[in-house]
Amino acid sequence: MPVNGARARRDQIVHLATTTGLTSVEELSRTFGVTASTIRRDLAQLTADGRLARTYGGAMALVAHPEASLRQRTGEAFEAKRAIARWAASTVRTGETVLLDAGSTVGALAHELRTAKRLTVATTGLTALQELADVETVRVECLGGTLRPLSQSFLGPLTEAALERMTFDRVFLGADGVTAEHGICEADLRQTRLKELMARRAEAVYVLAHSAKIGRRPFHTWMRLPPGWTLVTDGGADPAEIRALRAQGVEITVVEGG
């Protein structure tokens, strides 16, 4: 992201922290093409100015985070999402029935599954539907329900009723944030309820979240991340959070390429 001058860069850092939640030094360094030391100085100044709050390895906004739309989130951490999606796709076997959540990372997984053979994919997300709509070797089941425009996803009683009639080999969930203390963070209580129901219908549960979401708590709606589930992230994740999650029995897969 070409930004001229420290002041403009710091304004952009505040904007990113406000719209996307916790922001890491490493991701900001890559985004703006400057050294980590430069970013740390920016964060120190923004903290002194009362515009941000410092966290381990980064910063977060002082005000509640407005939820970004799926369109806004699609371009964030693109390489990390693609690497996570490739790994997730490698776990899917021919002939399986899988369930895909909404979200940009799970949408990237749907794109990777375009080459799958004899696969059934059920989904609550419009992105996955669009990615797989023209793939003849993949049978697509739309769970339907009430469309939530911000997340481009279906939810509500109709979605839940459809879930009761299917079981799955694997489910892949997205997340707005993940912490060892609280679990999976979402913007809407209906989303956390739906994810819980989705997980109950699958033999294996995967949570796909790039590193900037690890340790992030942008909203106040949560669901548990129990032992035995697999969190898939990239190498920029907060090591302390990863250690704490592993200590709780969560399986962690860290992919390269993010």
Image (tube, rainbow, N blue to C red):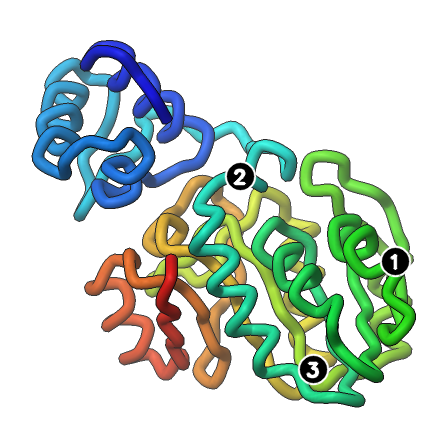
Q: Which of label 1 and label 3 is nearer to you?
A: 1
Q: Amino acid at mark 3?
A: Ala
Asked where in the image residue 30 lies, by quadrant, the reply is: top left
State the residue in front, 258 or 219: 258
In space, the residues marked 1 and 3 are separated at their CA atoms by 23 Å
In space, the residues marked 3 and 2 are separated at their CA atoms by 29 Å
In the structure shown, which secondary structural element does the residue marked by tag 1 occupy?
loop
At 27% from the left edge and 80% from the top edge, which residue is drawn? 247
Q: Is residue 10 shown above or below 114?
A: above
At 84% from the left edge and 84% from the top edge, which residue is drawn? 118
Decide: marks 1, 3 in contact (CB < 8 A)?
no
State the residue in front, 74 or 199: 74
Estimate how packed mark 2 is, as few (under 14), some (14 to 19) or many (20 or more) residues with alpha carbons within 10 Å. Answer: few
At 79% from the left edge and 63% from the top edge, which residue is drawn? 123
In the structure shown, which secondary structural element does the residue marked by tag 2 occupy?
loop
State the residue in front, 178 or 130: 130
The residue singled out by tag 2 in the image is: 75
Asked where in the image residue 15 lies, by quadrant, the reply is: top left
Which numbered dot is residue 143? none
For marks 1 and 2 on the same chain, the one whose residue lies earlier in the sequence: 2
The residue singled out by tag 1 in the image is: 133
- Left or right: where does residue 100 sit relative to residue 205? right
Q: Which of label 3 and label 2 is nearer to you?
A: 2
Position of residue 213 measured from the top left corner of the image (x, y, whole percent)? 40, 51
Estimate how packed mark 1 is, as few (under 14), some (14 to 19) or many (20 or more) residues with alpha carbons within 10 Å. Answer: few
Q: Amino acid at mark 2?
A: Gly
Position of residue 128 measured from the top left corner of the image (x, y, whole percent)? 75, 56
In the structure shown, which secondary structural element does the residue marked by tag 3 occupy?
strand
Position of residue 208 measured from the top left corner of the image (x, y, whole percent)? 52, 63
The residue singled out by tag 3 in the image is: 202
Q: Amino acid at mark 1?
A: Ala
For marks 1 and 3 on the same chain, the one whose residue lies earlier in the sequence: 1
